[in-house]
Image: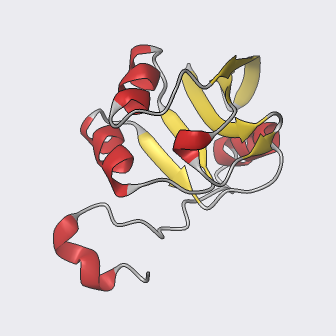
C-alpha cells in the first residue's frame, strides 16, 4: 500500500504547499486508488507539516511548489516529493501511480548543487 498526499485547494493541486487549504490523501494498492479522504491543513509552521504527514504514513507528497526546508525534511524521512504538479488532485495522484507525473526538479535536493538548480 502507498499513501499519497496532494496539497490542494479543494480538488485542485495548489501552488503553495504550506499554505494549501487541504490535503487530499489517497491510499493506493497495485497502482489503483482504493481510498481517498480530504483533511484541512492543520496549520503552517516551519517543519510541522512534513512531520505531520510522516506520522500519517504518507509515502509521497505532490504539490505545485514547496520550499527547500520542507523538501529536506521529507527527504530525511524517505518521503518522495513531486513538485510542479497542476490540475486535478486525484488525476495527479493517478498520473504519479502510472509513472507519468514526474517532479519538475525546480527545487534542489542538496545545497552543494545550488548552482545547477535551474532557478
* Image position of 49 with respect to 42: above or below: below
Residue located 60% across and 26% down the image = 41
x, y (%) of residue 13?
Answer: 73, 46
Q: In which image quadrant can residue 89 be found? A: top right
x, y (%) of residue 9?
Answer: 76, 39
Side of 119 where 40 appears, left or right: right
Q: In which image quadrant can residue 45 be found? A: top left
Residue located 23% across and 75% down the image = 113
Residue located 70% across and 46% down the image = 98
x, y (%) of residue 25?
Answer: 66, 24
Side of 4 where 117 appears, left or right: left
x, y (%) of residue 73?
Answer: 29, 40
Q: Residue furthest left?
A: 112
Q: Quadrant of the C terminus?
A: bottom left
* Image position of 55 with respect to 22: above or below: above
* Image position of 38 with respect to 116: above or below: above
Q: Quadrant of the N terminus?
A: top right
Residue located 49% across and 53% down the image = 66
* Image position of 68 with respect to 60: above or below: below
* Colouring: secondary structure
Q: In which image quadrant can residue 29 be found? A: top right
Side of 8 where 69 appears, left or right: left
Side of 115 where 93 appears, left or right: right
Amino acid at each position: 500500500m502507498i499513501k499519497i498526499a496532494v496539497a490542494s485547494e479543494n480538488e485542485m493541486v495548489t501552488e503553495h504547499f504550506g499554505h494549501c487549504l487541504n490535503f487530499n490523501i489517497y491510499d493506493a494498492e497495485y497502482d489503483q486508488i482504493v481510498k481517498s479522504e480530504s483533511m484541512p491543513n492543520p496549520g503552517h509552521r516551519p517543519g510541522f507539516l512534513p512531520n505531520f504527514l510522516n506520522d500519517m504514513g504518507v509515502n509521497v507528497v505532490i504539490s505545485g511548489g514547496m520550499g527547500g526546508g520542507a523538501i529536506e525534511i521529507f527527504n530525511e524521512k524517505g518521503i518522495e516529493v513531486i513538485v510542479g504538479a497542476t490540475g486535478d488532485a486525484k488525476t495527479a495522484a493517478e498520473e504519479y501511480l502510472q509513472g507519468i507525473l514526474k517532479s519538475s526538479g525546480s527545487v534542489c535536493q542538496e545545497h552543494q548543487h545550488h548552482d545547477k538548480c535551474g532557478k
